[in-house]
Structures are given as C-alpha cells and as structure tokens.
Amino acid sequence: MNIAKQNDRWRWLTAGAVAVSLLAFATLIVLLAWQGFRAFWPQPVTLFTLHSAPGQLLGEVVSREHYDRQQQLLRGLSADGAHPVTRYVIKTGNRDFSDADFHSLLDGEIVRQQRPRAIMVLQRRSGGNAYGWFVELREGDQPLTAQNPQAMLQQRLQQVRLQRRQAENIRQVEMAKINAQLEALDDEAGQQRRAGRFNAEQQSIYAADQLALQRQFTLQAERLASLLNDSERDALILRDAQGIEHRIPLSQIVHAWYPNSMTLSQQLSHFFQQLWHFLSDSSGASQSEGGVFPAIFGTILMVLMMSIVVMPLGVVAAIWLHEYAGKNLITQLVRIAVVNLAGVPSIVYGVFGLGFFVWLVGGTLDQLFFAHNLPNPTFGTPGLLWASLTLALLTLPVVIVATEEGLSRIPASLRQGALALGATRAETLWQITLPMAVPAMLTGLILAVARAAGETAPLMLVGVVKMVPELPVDAVFPYLHLDRKFMHLGFQIYDLAFQSPNAEADRPLVYASALLLVTIIISLNLLAMALRHRLRERYRALTQ
C-alpha cells in the first residue's frame, strides 16, 4: 500500500512538472504572438492638440502609464494635485523630417484628442512610417487628377512594385550572369598568360568576347536605369500635423492605408498583407524596414547544411565507439572528451571556426586555387560554409551521444542471431543495427537542429552579417555559393534588440522575429519527430 501511494505521488509530481512546462511554453508563444502581431495590425492614429508648441502632434499611442502622487515625485514630475497623472508614449513617425520617432505627453499638456478619418499612414522602405493627410499625387512636377485618388494611388503603387521587381531581376540575374561571364573570361586569359599561350590570336578573341559582354552589360544597365527613373517619377504629397507638405516618391512607399476608417475586414486584410510582406520581402535600409526573407532563408539553409555534415560524422563516431572500439581506457577517455565538448561555450567554437576553418583552411584554399583573386579572399573570409562546419562541430557531441544511446538499446540477441545465420559483422551492422538505431539518430538530429538554429555568438565570427546584397543561392553557376555571407534570424533579433538606433519602434519586430525563429525550430523538429515515429513503428516488432 505504501509503495502504491508513493507511486501515485510520483505520478502526480511528474504530471504537475509536465503541466507547468507546457504552460510555460504556451505562455511564451502567446507572449511572442501578442507582442509581435502588434507590428502588423493597423493601429489607430490620434491627433493631439497641445497647450504649447508644436501645437499639434500626430501618432500612434504606444502605451499609457498612470502615476499617483508618490510615483510622480519619484519620477521628477510636478505633483501639485492629488489626482493621478497619465503619461502617453506616442509613436509620431516621420523620422526623416521630424526630431524624434517617439514623444511623451502628460495629460495636462493635452487640450483635445481626436482620430480624424482622413489620416493616412505610409509604410516606407527607409525613414520609418509617415503620418499625415493625403494632398495629391504628382507625376514629375505635374499633379495627377482622378475621380478616385485612392484607387489611382494603389494602381500607381502596384505599377512601381512591378518596376522594382523587374529592376531587381535585371540586377540580380541578368547583370550577375554577365559579371560571372566576364570574371570567367578574365580567369581564362590569366591562365593563358601564366602558361605562355596568350598570343595575338588569343588576345583578339579575348578582346572580342569582352567587348560583346560589355555591350550586353551596358544594355542591361540602361534598362535598369530606365526602370529606376520611371519608378522615381511618381510621388505623393503628404501634409504633416504642422501643415508642412512633404514629397515622398512612390518607390519608397510599401503600403498606404487609412487606419481610422478601416472596417474589420480591411484590418484583417491589412494584417495578412503586412505579415506576408514581413515573411517574403527583403530587408530595406535597415533590418527594421522591409522583410526577413533573407534571414529565414539563411537560417534554414545553414541548418540543412549543418545537418548534412554532422549526421554522417556523428553516426560514424558513435558506431566506432559502440561497435568496434571495445571497452578500454582510450574509449573511456574519448567518451569523456565527447561529453565535455557538449558543455564548451558556443563562442569558443566560433573562435575555433574563425582560426581553423576561415584563416587556416580557407586561406590555404585561396593560396592553392584562388591565388589570382588575392589579396581579396574567396574562402579565406567568413561565409556560409564555415558557419555550417562550425555549428556541425558544436552539435557533434549531441549526435554522438544520442546515437550511441540508441545503439546500446538494441538487444544483443539480434546481432547474435544475424551472425549465427551467416551474416558478416558489416552486414549485421548495415541490415539490423543501423535501421533500428535510426530513431535515436533522428533524436540527436532534433537536438542538434534546436541548438544550432538558435545560436548567435559563434555565427558573428564565422559568416553572419547584418545585411547582405544577395542570397547564397542565385541563378549564376554554381548556384549555391558557399563563400558568401548570410543573414540569420538569431542575429537579427540581437541586432534589433540591442544595436538598433530606434529600439523602441523595433520592439514588436523583435517579438515577431523571435516567434518566427521558434516556429522554424518547431517545424524542423516536428518533421524529424514524425520520421522518427514512423521508423520506430516499422522496427518495433524486432525488439519484442
């Protein structure tokens, strides 16, 4: 009876611990979603009439704080009366033609608050949001007239987006291909010079090919300049709270909306439109403007490359330790070293990756294969390949330990039965042992992915950057460029939270990026867990 009671207590204790863990995880997700989705939901814009200059202030109310008399004295506010004071934090935007992006007001400074339905919000590619009243559209210096100016604005914005996409395609695909062909042509000419075969005939061929490529490049550059000039031609005139009119090119505007007059369906449509822009667009002038697609792409690509490297190494090491090494002092020391490596701080791996992979291995590759590019390094600089290898080294102990644990759970009778039936040791390993250990291998992969996707410190040394001009994958051979730097969600969260000059405005994006990173990790883990469950069910009968 006492044993049964003790078991009941342990079961309740275990259930309580699991419930608390699930509640903490759910609370984390809800907090990230609540704070992050605020960046995409259209917030109402309030016009404040003030007692003193500047007279009027226009913006979104970010927070309201109520202070009693004691709190007023602690914060250095005047506490003449006994009534509590309300302090408003207002996001005023208009960063490029205003003194600050945020203002604080006390309710005693405010004469009146109102929410005019004609207030327009412009989401821009640089300078943050702009708030004001729509005045007119201009094509060059000529005003545009239409029965429905808002429909014409959306039509012109769509036209400008199409022009920008065409310009990006010319820059990133057509011109990039021509640049690659010019570089290959120069490399071939350099090889011929070093071999002493760059005679008059080869020089003539080289000059003709180079001239043809330069003509193609000039033609594409003219097309690009024409598209950019067309996209810069149209502009919107916006009047701010002080009555000053500002000319904003449509090429700088991502979206335009009237938050105080939107219906619920329009707000939902705007929310999903902003969410898609956040997920699919590239970064703007800073990480807080534009989307996070390069960071998503870089994070997933780095994790996949890390997995391709770490799984074979970890599995082979675990097989050697468990199946072939035997039980001796050397094996015990190796196991102790592997376990200890799992506790080494990640920044140490970053320093090792910088010194060994980047400077030693990469520098040697440059000397052997890319000497014609020196002193500009090709692989002797931080990049995607070295970041993936560094994280593979960081997560290798996790995969080794998990795989070896899985191998130890396989009954010895299965190995002995296979050997008794005439199978060799290698056939037993390949046909019996490894398939049954696949769930344990995937467990190690899950743990490795969860740790690697969230690492930031080592990546800052071996390849991740704040902004990249191009993705590691493009339409130019060899298509996957392992030497390029990349963006990462973990580093973007760090940069937005601690390095941004306007951290208050970027706070919702920090939560949204963190939620996105957690979602990516959960998705990769669920995929591995589903595969592990399927394989476990397939080989369950062998262990019973």
Image: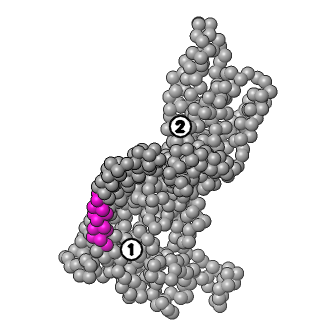
| Left or right, residue 89 beside residue 272 | right
Dominant SS type (magenta): helix
| Left or right, residue 345 beside residue 483 | right
| Left or right, residue 479 beside residue 495 | left
> How many residues crowd mark 1 within 10 Å: few (<14), some (14–19), many (20+)?
many
Question: Which residue is nearer to you in this view: 3 or 53?
Answer: 53
Residue tagged 1: 121
Residue 120 can be seen in this image: yes
Q: Residue at x 52, y 77 (%)?
A: 102
Q: Give the range drawn in magenta.
A: 215-232
Q: Which residue is drawn at 74% across and 37% down?
A: 337
Against 198, residue 54 (above or below) is below
Question: What residue occupies the far right of the structure in this picture?
Answer: 329
Does the stretch in magenta take in 13? Answer: no
Q: Residue at x 53, y 56 (%)?
A: 376
**Which labelled disc corresponds to residue 308?**
2
Question: Which residue is nearer to you in this view: 333 or 127?
Answer: 333
The type of residue carrying mark 2 is Ile
Residue 162 can be seen in this image: no
Against 321, residue 239 (above or below) is below
